[in-house]
Image (tube, helix red, strand yellow):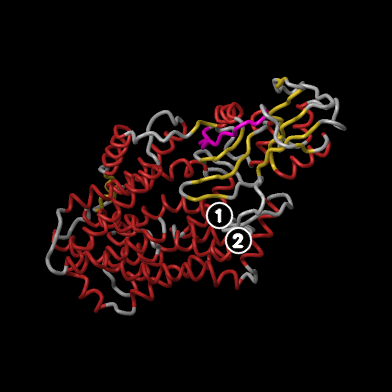
Amino acid sequence: MRPVSLLRENGTLIVSMLIGAQDVSVNADVKNVAFALFIFSLGYMAGPQFFANMNAKGLRFGVLSVLEAVVVILLAFGFAVGFDLDVGTAAGILAGAATESAVVGTAQEAISQLGGITEDQSQQLQAHVATAYSVCYLFGLVSIVMLTSQVFPLLMRIKLPEASRALWEKMRGGEGGPGSGEQAALPALVGRTYLVSQGEGSRVGTLEAESRQLVSIEGVKRGDQVLTVAPELQLRRGDRVLVVGRRAAVMATGHDLGPETSGVPGLDSPLAVRQVVVTRKEISGRTVTELRAAEPETVGGVYLTDIQRVDQHLPAIGETELHQGDTLTVVGARVKVERFATKVGATVRQDTADYIYLSLGICAGVLLGMVTIHVGEVNLSLGTGGGCLIAGLVFGWLRAQRPTFGAYPPVAAQTAKDLGLSIFIAVTGMAAGPDAGPLLKQYPVLLPAAGVLMVVIPAFLSLFVGRKLLKIEPPILIGAIAGQQCSTPAITAVSNVARSSVPMLGYTITYTISNFLLPLTGPVLVGIIGL
């Protein structure tokens, strides 16, 4: 979630609790519908990346997400036992310290299904979830932001901007380049016209291959005739050639051809800009460099300018690994861009939302959440939250495999997610208002302390495991720790300090996996304490 959204979310909760203290309430069905909309949209957006990360690299980073989920459950259970907390307060501590709003909903659903308590007791326990969450969230958020952006770089004895820049250049093969918030003084993609002199006899295909597909010949004019460009076309002295591609590669190719000339009428070739979603399994898992080397015919003449994963932008460099569901922004001649889109996946179309497909997904999630497993006297179920989360993951993944149906434009999905969460938090806060004061008076020190400790302990464990055992590069590890906490404010702070998007490479993997695991920790904790 975005930083502004997170601040609005906590503000909504506090204000709604104040309103609720005046005995103002809203039907609980409104909360349930809003929560289903929120968590289905969350799963839908993360679905393609969640399944794409089910590989060796993803599971390597997934260790951090699993560590986070296990440790917060154990810590919350420890607080419950050590301080004789009720299940609602313990679940609220878990949700707030993990800065994961979805846990509030899943935990409240699990509490509503507990046996042996009255309806009034159930409502009070659910109110305690919201109250404890509101306090622990603030302290947990500040803690993870400070740890990732300030404390961890000091402990690893690195300067985050320099370490990120060095790793960026290493991943680019030693080429320098602007980082986050920077723009090159000269454009990276250029088109230049050259007069063939010393390059007489060269073939178009040979020139493009020698540049490692970093340039493409987009036009050749011989006298007054514009020729059809083909790999076997042989250049002659006096030909005027339009070369398009990366600046350094274009200049190197031009050096082999002859002197640069001014623009030539008839050779100007407009470039198309398209967004392409990766759907082919053969492409998933390859780096940009590997794709260029393995399929030169597909990539030739097409230039990657941006990679978007979930709702984050990754560096478009050679060592960035592509996943199914990634949205690539590419530039090139129209024919070549369309060929690239056909081979890699499909062109993203700004369709209207497919409401039938999305409604089926939410209904499937609700039905899945109604499945109950009996363990002794305890009834275990995913609830609406867990069911809609899983349904969202699956339906989002299916959409990525076949982008011809199930459209859910990113802006619409983000709006639905934010709206559903805001309504859910507001209704939850109003229900919790009457019980908030007594709980805060009872635990004025414990709740803030728990919020800090439940962030600090798993974060330090992940720092040790990530560096000593998994050998993850420091900038990427810091991003991964922010991701295991699903903390967008933390990764925003890290990226601002690093002045680079390199930490995003670790963040997107753990963020996606934790978005699945953390909401399930609420019912697990409630079930353990209920036993």
Specify the segment rendered in magenta.
267-279
Q: Quadrant of residue 351?
A: top left
Q: Is residue 525 above or below residue 305?
A: below
Query: Which callout, 2 or 1, points at the residue further toward the start of the chain?
Result: 2
* Relative image position of residue 138 (x, y in whole percent): 37, 70
- Report, in whole angstroms, how far the alpha carbon at label 2 lies from the one at label 1: 8 Å
Which quadrant is the N terminus positioned in?
bottom left
Q: Residue furthest left?
A: 23
Indicate the position of residue 482 as horizontal and vertical percent values: 49, 61
Of 270 and 66, which appears nearest the observer? 270
Question: Could you tell me the amino acid type at mark 1?
Answer: Gly
For this rendering, which residue is in front, 262 or 270? 262
What residue appears at the point 58 percent right and 41 percent down from the top-left corner? 322
Task: Name the residue that disc number 1 marks.
Answer: 506
Q: Is residue 271 magenta?
A: yes
User: Could you say which quadrant of the image residue 112 lies in?
Assistant: bottom left
